[in-house]
Image: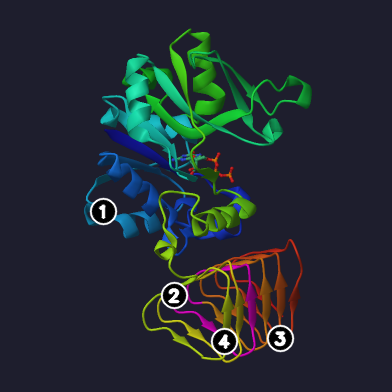
Amino acid sequence: MKAVILSGGFGTRLRPLTINTPKSMIPVLNIPFLEYLIKRLKSHKVSDIALAVSYLAEPIKNYFGDGSRFDVKLSYTVEEIPLGTAGAVKNAGGFIDEPTLVFNGDVFTDLDLTDMMENHKRNKAMLTIALTPVEDPTSYGLVETDSNNRILRFLEKPSPDEITTNMINAGTYILEPEVMSLIPAQTNCSFERDIFPLLLRNKEDVFAYPTDCYWMDIGKPENYFQVHYDLLNGKSNQYHFNNGRKKMVTGTNCIIHPSARISGTVVIGNNCIIGQDVKINGPVVIGSNCQISNYSIIDDSILWNSVHVEPLAKIKHTIIANDCHIGSGSIIEQAVLGNNTIVGYGKHIKAGQLVSPNTIVS
Ligand code: GTP
């Protein structure tokens, strides 16, 4: 089987993190999100994968290269300006010469891809869209089906009285190569808004593949936290937190002061130093080369690599990207800090603040 992964969006809902890091490279438990997806594809015998990239393509290419490290064949199609989800797949040109999986590169899911492909073939579908249930359907595009899972209608962000289903488009599709002829070349075009409704109007065989397996769109800060909580709680079959044995996993070369108090589920990368009387209240994820200095408190937070926290700082429900420096005695709550932020001594970053990369908060 073949797959195209869409990794070229701006990721505006995850700003400031996505200013330097493409959404698909954002770490989930210290591993780039895309690595989970590629390993999952491989486990379903999908080893010919095209990455449709645009904005910030280099970090993806540098990490994954030709895919041989993951035993898959990776190719890249690069858009000079983002062409939209369908335009990006069109840009992959001749790659799609058989029924092909297409993935939004920001959805963490345990979807059974082999079974989805079998369903697609059994239905002789032109397009199959994976569906997932959500609690509050008002902010999503809903998909209405008949009892045979044939798609009848797409409903964009309906009002409460219009809601007939709680099933939404899960961002994974299987396309027949014929769909490509409907997508204009080098033009911004969206599957959800343009091509899927067009296929319905053309009375093509468009089917749903509904499933209630684990699914999370990591594209918003709260969802990014949630995918961490879920993986640490064993809700996905793609991650077994230390095989259920311990509450803490540390990488190599870490120095943890014996007086540090670590509770809850905690993941720490390589070469980290955790100082005297530091409190870490999980769930907490700390990347590699981080230093948490004496008497600091880290509570329910995600720190990427090379973050230096000076003494007596308090960090709660916050995401801190690479190379940040947090001054002593500072307090940071419910914030998102972009790469290379410097927070001065005793500063208070209040709830909801999004700090752009390279900012000095003094
Ligand atoms: P937001 O701006 O936060 O909505 O994020 P986004 O720009 O990534 O858009 P969205 O979440 O709707 O995109 C779904 C998936 O398609 C993501 O994996 C995007 O990276 C990808 N995507 C969106 N637009 C494009 C595009 O123009 N080109 C390519 N190659 N991928 C895209």
Q: Residue at x 71, y 25 (%)?
A: 158
Give, as a single range, the part of the protein colored magenta.
287-306
**Which of these two is toward me, 132 or 180?**
132
Q: Residue at x 28, y 44 (%)?
A: 42
Instruction: Mark 2 and mark 4 in contact? Answer it, CB < 8 Å.
Output: no
The quadrant where residue 358 appears: bottom right
Ligand 1: does it lie within 8 Å of the C-beta at label 3? no
Foreground disc of the pair 2, 4: 4
- First reached walking from the N terminus: tag 2 or tag 4: 4
Q: Which residue is mark 3?
A: 329
Query: Is-magenta flag for residue 301?
Result: yes
Q: Residue at x 72, y 77 (%)?
A: 331
Q: Position of residue 327 (x, y in %)?
A: 65, 84
With respect to residue 184, does 310 lie above or below?
A: below
Ligand 1: does it lie within 8 Å of the C-beta at label 1? no
Q: CA distance from mark 2 to mark 3?
A: 23 Å
Q: CA distance from mark 1 to mark 2?
A: 22 Å
Q: Which residue is mark 2?
A: 288
Q: Which residue is mark 4?
A: 260
Q: Quadrant of the N terminus?
A: top left
Q: Is residue 220 left or right of residue 26?
A: right
Q: CA distance from mark 2 to mark 4?
A: 18 Å
Q: Which residue is mark 1?
A: 70
Task: Specify few, some or many for label 4: CA neighbours under 10 Å numbering under 14, 14-19, or 20 or more.
Answer: some
Ligand 1: does it lie within 8 Å of the C-beta at label 4? no
Query: Which residue of the protein is positioned furthest toward the front in this rendering?
Result: 245
**Which of these two is toward me, 22 or 148?**
148
Foreground disc of the pair 3, 4: 4
Residue 91 appears in the picture as rendered: no
Query: Which residue of the protein is positioned furthest toward the top in this rendering?
Result: 203
